[in-house]
Image: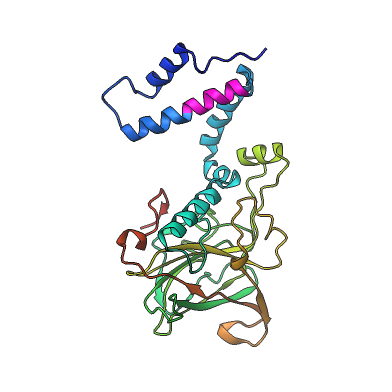
Amino acid sequence: MTVKTIQTEAVQTLLKKVAGLDKDQGNPRMKEIVYRLVSDLYKMIEDLDITPDEFWEGVHYLNDLGTTKEAVLLAPGLGFDHFLDIREDAKDEAAGLAGGTPRTIEGPLYVENAPISEGETRMDDGQSPGQGMWLHGKVLDEEGNPVAGAVVDLWHADSKGGYSYFDPTQSEFNLRRRVITDADGCYRARSIVPNGYGVPPEGNTIKVLQSLGRHGNRPAHIHYFVSKPGYKHLTTQINLAGDAYTYDDFAFATRDELVVESTSKNDKAHGFDSEYLEVEFNIEILKTDNAELEDKHARARASVA
Protein backbone atom coordinates (compact mmCIF):
# COMPACT_ATOMS: atom_id res chain seq x y z
CA MET A 1 0.00 0.00 0.00
CA THR A 2 1.34 3.44 -1.00
CA VAL A 3 1.27 6.05 1.74
CA LYS A 4 1.86 9.79 1.44
CA THR A 5 4.01 11.46 4.07
CA ILE A 6 5.97 14.13 2.22
CA GLN A 7 3.71 16.98 3.32
CA THR A 8 3.45 15.91 6.93
CA GLU A 9 4.88 18.16 9.61
CA ALA A 10 7.35 15.44 10.61
CA VAL A 11 8.88 15.16 7.12
CA GLN A 12 8.90 18.91 6.45
CA THR A 13 10.64 19.53 9.78
CA LEU A 14 13.14 16.78 8.96
CA LEU A 15 13.93 18.32 5.57
CA LYS A 16 14.63 21.73 7.11
CA LYS A 17 16.94 20.20 9.69
CA VAL A 18 18.75 18.06 7.08
CA ALA A 19 19.47 21.17 4.98
CA GLY A 20 20.47 23.27 7.99
CA LEU A 21 17.63 25.71 7.45
CA ASP A 22 17.12 25.86 11.21
CA LYS A 23 20.69 27.14 11.68
CA ASP A 24 22.29 30.53 10.96
CA GLN A 25 25.65 28.97 10.12
CA GLY A 26 26.57 27.41 6.80
CA ASN A 27 26.46 28.26 3.09
CA PRO A 28 23.04 29.53 1.94
CA ARG A 29 23.50 28.26 -1.61
CA MET A 30 24.49 24.81 -0.37
CA LYS A 31 21.45 24.76 1.90
CA GLU A 32 19.18 25.67 -1.02
CA ILE A 33 20.64 22.91 -3.21
CA VAL A 34 20.59 20.22 -0.52
CA TYR A 35 17.03 21.09 0.49
CA ARG A 36 15.82 20.77 -3.11
CA LEU A 37 17.85 17.61 -3.77
CA VAL A 38 16.76 15.76 -0.64
CA SER A 39 13.15 16.94 -1.03
CA ASP A 40 13.02 15.59 -4.57
CA LEU A 41 14.60 12.31 -3.50
CA TYR A 42 12.15 11.89 -0.62
CA LYS A 43 9.29 12.57 -3.04
CA MET A 44 10.67 10.06 -5.55
CA ILE A 45 10.92 7.40 -2.84
CA GLU A 46 7.32 8.02 -1.97
CA ASP A 47 5.95 8.34 -5.51
CA LEU A 48 7.73 5.20 -6.76
CA ASP A 49 7.26 3.32 -3.52
CA ILE A 50 10.99 2.57 -3.34
CA THR A 51 11.68 -0.13 -0.79
CA PRO A 52 14.40 0.00 1.89
CA ASP A 53 16.24 -2.78 0.03
CA GLU A 54 16.21 -0.76 -3.21
CA PHE A 55 17.33 2.36 -1.36
CA TRP A 56 20.29 0.67 0.31
CA GLU A 57 21.27 -1.04 -2.94
CA GLY A 58 21.56 2.46 -4.41
CA VAL A 59 23.61 3.68 -1.46
CA HIS A 60 26.04 0.78 -1.79
CA TYR A 61 26.28 1.47 -5.53
CA LEU A 62 27.29 5.08 -4.84
CA ASN A 63 29.87 3.81 -2.37
CA ASP A 64 31.39 1.60 -5.08
CA LEU A 65 31.12 4.39 -7.66
CA GLY A 66 33.31 6.62 -5.52
CA THR A 67 35.85 3.84 -5.05
CA THR A 68 36.24 3.29 -8.79
CA LYS A 69 36.09 7.03 -9.56
CA GLU A 70 33.60 6.44 -12.37
CA ALA A 71 31.22 9.28 -11.53
CA VAL A 72 32.91 11.26 -14.33
CA LEU A 73 31.76 8.53 -16.74
CA LEU A 74 28.29 8.00 -15.30
CA ALA A 75 27.49 11.74 -15.46
CA PRO A 76 27.81 12.01 -19.27
CA GLY A 77 26.24 8.57 -19.63
CA LEU A 78 23.12 9.90 -17.92
CA GLY A 79 23.10 12.96 -20.16
CA PHE A 80 24.17 15.54 -17.57
CA ASP A 81 27.05 16.93 -19.64
CA HIS A 82 24.85 17.29 -22.71
CA PHE A 83 22.03 18.79 -20.66
CA LEU A 84 24.43 21.43 -19.33
CA ASP A 85 25.44 22.21 -22.94
CA ILE A 86 21.78 22.58 -23.93
CA ARG A 87 21.34 25.06 -21.08
CA GLU A 88 24.47 27.01 -22.04
CA ASP A 89 23.28 27.15 -25.67
CA ALA A 90 19.93 28.51 -24.48
CA LYS A 91 21.67 31.13 -22.31
CA ASP A 92 23.79 32.19 -25.29
CA GLU A 93 20.70 32.47 -27.47
CA ALA A 94 18.94 34.62 -24.88
CA ALA A 95 22.02 36.85 -24.48
CA GLY A 96 22.58 37.28 -28.22
CA LEU A 97 25.81 35.25 -28.09
CA ALA A 98 24.75 32.34 -30.30
CA GLY A 99 26.77 31.39 -33.35
CA GLY A 100 30.19 30.09 -34.22
CA THR A 101 31.36 26.51 -33.95
CA PRO A 102 29.01 24.57 -31.66
CA ARG A 103 30.14 23.57 -28.21
CA THR A 104 29.99 20.02 -26.97
CA ILE A 105 31.10 18.20 -23.86
CA GLU A 106 34.64 18.43 -22.50
CA GLY A 107 34.75 14.91 -21.11
CA PRO A 108 36.72 13.85 -18.04
CA LEU A 109 40.16 13.25 -19.57
CA TYR A 110 41.68 16.70 -20.14
CA VAL A 111 45.16 17.41 -18.74
CA GLU A 112 46.48 20.95 -18.42
CA ASN A 113 49.86 22.32 -19.51
CA ALA A 114 50.38 20.27 -22.67
CA PRO A 115 53.44 21.31 -24.74
CA ILE A 116 52.81 24.40 -26.84
CA SER A 117 54.18 25.39 -30.25
CA GLU A 118 53.64 27.95 -33.00
CA GLY A 119 51.59 27.00 -36.05
CA GLU A 120 52.40 23.30 -36.21
CA THR A 121 53.04 20.38 -33.89
CA ARG A 122 53.48 16.64 -33.70
CA MET A 123 51.15 15.08 -31.15
CA ASP A 124 52.32 11.46 -30.99
CA ASP A 125 55.59 10.34 -29.44
CA GLY A 126 56.63 8.19 -32.39
CA GLN A 127 56.09 5.03 -30.34
CA SER A 128 52.28 4.83 -30.58
CA PRO A 129 51.06 2.41 -33.24
CA GLY A 130 48.33 3.49 -35.60
CA GLN A 131 47.58 5.08 -38.95
CA GLY A 132 48.99 8.55 -39.42
CA MET A 133 46.70 11.58 -39.33
CA TRP A 134 47.26 15.12 -40.57
CA LEU A 135 44.87 17.40 -38.66
CA HIS A 136 44.62 21.02 -39.73
CA GLY A 137 42.32 23.97 -40.16
CA LYS A 138 41.77 27.67 -39.58
CA VAL A 139 40.42 29.65 -36.68
CA LEU A 140 38.16 32.44 -37.93
CA ASP A 141 36.00 35.15 -36.39
CA GLU A 142 32.30 35.58 -37.17
CA GLU A 143 33.14 37.75 -40.21
CA GLY A 144 35.40 35.05 -41.63
CA ASN A 145 38.65 36.82 -40.77
CA PRO A 146 41.59 34.69 -39.60
CA VAL A 147 42.33 34.82 -35.88
CA ALA A 148 46.08 34.81 -35.34
CA GLY A 149 47.51 33.94 -31.94
CA ALA A 150 44.60 31.74 -30.80
CA VAL A 151 45.53 28.74 -28.68
CA VAL A 152 44.15 25.47 -30.04
CA ASP A 153 44.39 22.88 -27.25
CA LEU A 154 44.06 19.35 -28.69
CA TRP A 155 43.83 15.94 -27.07
CA HIS A 156 42.64 12.52 -28.20
CA ALA A 157 42.94 8.79 -27.54
CA ASP A 158 45.42 6.39 -29.08
CA SER A 159 44.52 3.53 -31.44
CA LYS A 160 43.35 1.45 -28.45
CA GLY A 161 41.11 4.17 -27.04
CA GLY A 162 43.47 5.08 -24.18
CA TYR A 163 44.52 8.56 -23.05
CA SER A 164 47.97 9.50 -21.77
CA TYR A 165 48.21 10.31 -18.06
CA PHE A 166 45.28 7.96 -17.40
CA ASP A 167 46.94 5.14 -19.37
CA PRO A 168 50.34 4.49 -17.74
CA THR A 169 51.65 2.70 -20.83
CA GLN A 170 51.77 6.00 -22.75
CA SER A 171 54.43 8.66 -22.48
CA GLU A 172 53.73 11.96 -20.76
CA PHE A 173 51.50 14.26 -22.84
CA ASN A 174 51.31 11.76 -25.67
CA LEU A 175 48.58 12.91 -28.08
CA ARG A 176 48.13 16.18 -26.17
CA ARG A 177 49.36 19.44 -27.64
CA ARG A 178 48.62 23.16 -27.85
CA VAL A 179 49.12 25.02 -31.12
CA ILE A 180 49.15 28.81 -31.52
CA THR A 181 47.56 29.81 -34.81
CA ASP A 182 49.78 31.60 -37.34
CA ALA A 183 49.15 34.91 -39.10
CA ASP A 184 46.57 33.22 -41.36
CA GLY A 185 44.75 31.66 -38.41
CA CYS A 186 46.05 28.19 -39.30
CA TYR A 187 46.90 25.30 -37.00
CA ARG A 188 48.46 22.01 -38.10
CA ALA A 189 49.10 18.79 -36.20
CA ARG A 190 50.64 15.47 -37.16
CA SER A 191 49.23 12.61 -35.13
CA ILE A 192 47.69 9.13 -35.34
CA VAL A 193 44.05 8.24 -35.96
CA PRO A 194 42.29 7.85 -32.60
CA ASN A 195 39.95 5.06 -31.69
CA GLY A 196 36.79 5.30 -29.65
CA TYR A 197 36.60 3.79 -26.20
CA GLY A 198 34.16 2.04 -23.93
CA VAL A 199 33.53 2.37 -20.21
CA PRO A 200 35.23 -0.31 -18.08
CA PRO A 201 33.46 -3.61 -18.86
CA GLU A 202 33.30 -4.66 -15.21
CA GLY A 203 32.80 -1.16 -13.80
CA ASN A 204 29.97 0.72 -12.16
CA THR A 205 28.91 2.79 -15.17
CA ILE A 206 28.19 -0.18 -17.40
CA LYS A 207 26.01 -1.74 -14.67
CA VAL A 208 23.62 1.20 -14.92
CA LEU A 209 23.77 1.47 -18.69
CA GLN A 210 23.09 -2.23 -19.25
CA SER A 211 20.18 -2.13 -16.83
CA LEU A 212 18.76 0.57 -19.13
CA GLY A 213 19.38 -1.54 -22.24
CA ARG A 214 22.23 0.75 -23.35
CA HIS A 215 25.92 0.36 -24.25
CA GLY A 216 28.89 2.35 -22.98
CA ASN A 217 30.81 3.15 -26.17
CA ARG A 218 32.09 6.40 -27.64
CA PRO A 219 33.05 7.00 -31.29
CA ALA A 220 36.50 8.13 -32.42
CA HIS A 221 36.80 11.83 -31.57
CA ILE A 222 39.26 14.69 -31.07
CA HIS A 223 38.86 17.25 -28.30
CA TYR A 224 39.39 21.01 -28.68
CA PHE A 225 39.71 24.04 -26.46
CA VAL A 226 40.10 27.24 -28.49
CA SER A 227 40.89 30.53 -26.77
CA LYS A 228 42.25 34.02 -27.23
CA PRO A 229 41.77 37.24 -25.24
CA GLY A 230 38.84 39.15 -26.68
CA TYR A 231 37.09 35.98 -27.83
CA LYS A 232 34.64 33.59 -26.22
CA HIS A 233 36.30 30.35 -25.12
CA LEU A 234 35.18 27.31 -27.11
CA THR A 235 34.97 23.76 -25.77
CA THR A 236 34.17 21.26 -28.48
CA GLN A 237 35.16 17.97 -30.11
CA ILE A 238 34.89 16.47 -33.56
CA ASN A 239 33.82 12.98 -34.57
CA LEU A 240 35.46 11.18 -37.46
CA ALA A 241 32.69 10.26 -39.89
CA GLY A 242 31.98 6.58 -40.45
CA ASP A 243 32.46 5.33 -36.91
CA ALA A 244 29.77 2.84 -35.84
CA TYR A 245 29.04 4.92 -32.74
CA THR A 246 29.10 8.41 -34.29
CA TYR A 247 25.34 8.78 -33.89
CA ASP A 248 25.05 6.40 -30.97
CA ASP A 249 27.48 7.94 -28.48
CA PHE A 250 26.74 6.89 -24.90
CA ALA A 251 27.82 10.40 -23.79
CA PHE A 252 25.49 12.20 -26.27
CA ALA A 253 28.31 14.45 -27.55
CA THR A 254 27.67 14.16 -31.31
CA ARG A 255 26.47 17.23 -33.19
CA ASP A 256 25.98 17.16 -36.96
CA GLU A 257 28.22 20.20 -37.51
CA LEU A 258 31.05 18.41 -35.70
CA VAL A 259 31.08 15.21 -37.75
CA VAL A 260 34.10 15.55 -40.05
CA GLU A 261 34.98 13.55 -43.15
CA SER A 262 38.56 12.42 -43.63
CA THR A 263 40.51 11.86 -46.84
CA SER A 264 42.94 9.01 -47.38
CA LYS A 265 46.30 10.29 -48.70
CA ASN A 266 49.46 8.51 -49.82
CA ASP A 267 51.62 11.40 -51.01
CA LYS A 268 54.46 11.07 -48.46
CA ALA A 269 53.76 14.61 -47.24
CA HIS A 270 54.09 15.90 -43.67
CA GLY A 271 56.73 13.29 -42.81
CA PHE A 272 54.51 10.24 -43.36
CA ASP A 273 56.02 7.26 -45.14
CA SER A 274 52.73 5.43 -45.70
CA GLU A 275 49.04 6.11 -46.20
CA TYR A 276 47.54 8.61 -43.74
CA LEU A 277 44.24 10.38 -43.14
CA GLU A 278 43.85 14.11 -43.72
CA VAL A 279 41.30 15.73 -41.42
CA GLU A 280 40.37 19.39 -41.88
CA PHE A 281 38.36 21.25 -39.27
CA ASN A 282 37.84 24.98 -39.45
CA ILE A 283 36.66 26.78 -36.33
CA GLU A 284 34.66 29.97 -35.82
CA ILE A 285 34.98 31.79 -32.50
CA LEU A 286 33.04 34.83 -31.34
CA LYS A 287 34.35 38.18 -30.17
CA THR A 288 33.44 39.27 -26.66
CA ASP A 289 34.20 42.11 -24.28
CA ASN A 290 33.19 39.95 -21.30
CA ALA A 291 36.42 38.66 -19.76
CA GLU A 292 34.54 35.90 -17.94
CA LEU A 293 33.64 34.32 -21.28
CA GLU A 294 37.28 34.12 -22.37
CA ASP A 295 38.10 31.30 -19.95
CA LYS A 296 36.86 27.74 -19.72
CA HIS A 297 34.57 26.98 -16.80
CA ALA A 298 36.48 26.11 -13.65
CA ARG A 299 36.26 22.43 -12.75
CA ALA A 300 38.46 19.77 -11.24
CA ARG A 301 40.93 18.54 -13.87
CA ALA A 302 44.09 16.54 -13.99
CA SER A 303 47.16 18.77 -14.01
CA VAL A 304 50.76 17.96 -14.83
CA ALA A 305 53.27 20.71 -14.03
Q: In which quarter of the image is residue 210?
A: top right
Q: Give the range drawn in magenta.
A: 38-47
Residue drawn at the location 56% of the way across and 84% of the way down? 270
Residue drawn at the location 37% of the way across and 70% of the way down? 287
Residue drawn at the location 36% of the way across and 77% of the way down? 149
Q: Quadrant of residue 239?
A: bottom right
**Residue 134, x across and y down, in percent:** 57, 77
**Residue 33, x across and y down, in percent:** 41, 33
The one nearer the camera, 147 or 131, is 147
Residue drawn at the location 34% of the way across and 35% of the way down? 29
Q: In which quarter of the image is residue 196?
A: bottom right
Please tell me whether residue 81 belongs to the stretch shown in magenta: no
Do we see residue 275 in this rendering? no
Specify the farthest residue to the left. Answer: 24
Left or right, 169 with reference to 118: right
Q: Quadrant of the N terminus?
A: top right
Left or right, 242 with reference to 171: right
Q: How is the image coloured?
A: rainbow
Say if 171 sits above or below 261 in the image: above
Is the stretch drawn in magenta largely helix, strand or loop?
A: helix
**Residue 18, x across and y down, in percent:** 40, 21
